[in-house]
Amino acid sequence: MADLLWDDVKWCFFDLDLMGSLPDVRVPDASVEDWQSVLDLIAEKGWQCQYSEGDMALPVPRAEAVLSRPADAECPELRVWPTADVLAIFRFYADDEVDFDVDLRELQGQDRLDVFCGFLREVGRRLGKSVLMDPEGEDGHPVLGFDIEADRVVLLADPQVR
C-alpha cells in the first residue's frame, strides 16, 4: 500500500507553482554520525551517486572530512539517484541537519511518488528520525515527511490550506 496517494497530493504538495520546483528536504537534529549513516546507506543500496566540489567530481569522502572543511570553502554536493529518473541532491551545509533537494518535475505520478516516499523511509529508518519536506525556501513549515512512529510518509499540513 502506498504511503501517499498521488490524487490526494498532486494539486497541493507537488504543484510547481505552489511549492517551487525544488522543495527542501531535511533531517533536523542530525550529527556527523547521521551524515555518515546516510553515506553508508547510499553505498549499501547501490544507488548511483556523484560527489563534487565545484566542478570537480571526486570519490565520496567520509562525512567528517566533508563537514570539517573551512568555512569559506565551496559547499560540496552529492547527487543520488535512488532510481534512474529520480534525483536527490545532498548539500553539506551543516553537521546538525541532513539537507537535500528534490525536483518536483521528476516526482509526477504515483510511481515516482512511491519512489520518493521509499527514499524518505529508507533515510528515516536508517537514522531513526523524521525526514521533513518544506516548500522551497520555507524551512520550518513541513508539508509531509517520514514519521518514525508511524513508520511511513505522512501529510504534515492540510492539503486544503496550501
Image (tube, grey):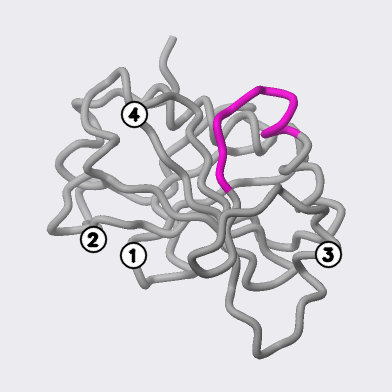
- Residue 82, percent from left and from top: 50, 29
* Residue at the spot of label 1: 136
Tell whether position 43 is magenta.
yes
* Residue at the spot of label 4: 85
* Residue at the spot of label 3: 65
- Residue 38, percent from left and from top: 72, 43
In the image, residue 20 sits, relative to residue 146, either above or below, namely: below
Work out whether residue 162 or residue 14 is closer to the camera in this orientation and state it: 14
How far apart are the alpha carbons under marks 2 and 1? Answer: 5 Å
* Label 1 residue SS: loop
Work out whether residue 42 or residue 162 is closer to the camera in this orientation and state it: 42
Work out whether residue 68 or residue 38 is closer to the camera in this orientation and state it: 68
The three-letter code of the residue at mark 4 reads Asp
Circle 4 packing at 10 Å, graded few (<14), some (14-19), many (20+), is: few
Q: Residue furthest bottom?
A: 72
N-terminal of the pair, mark 2 or mark 3, is: 2
N-terminal of the pair, mark 1 or mark 4, is: 4
N-terminal of the pair, mark 2 or mark 1, is: 2
The three-letter code of the residue at mark 1 reads Glu
N-terminal of the pair, mark 4 or mark 2, is: 2
Specify the segment rendered in magenta: 41-50
N-terminal of the pair, mark 3 or mark 1, is: 3
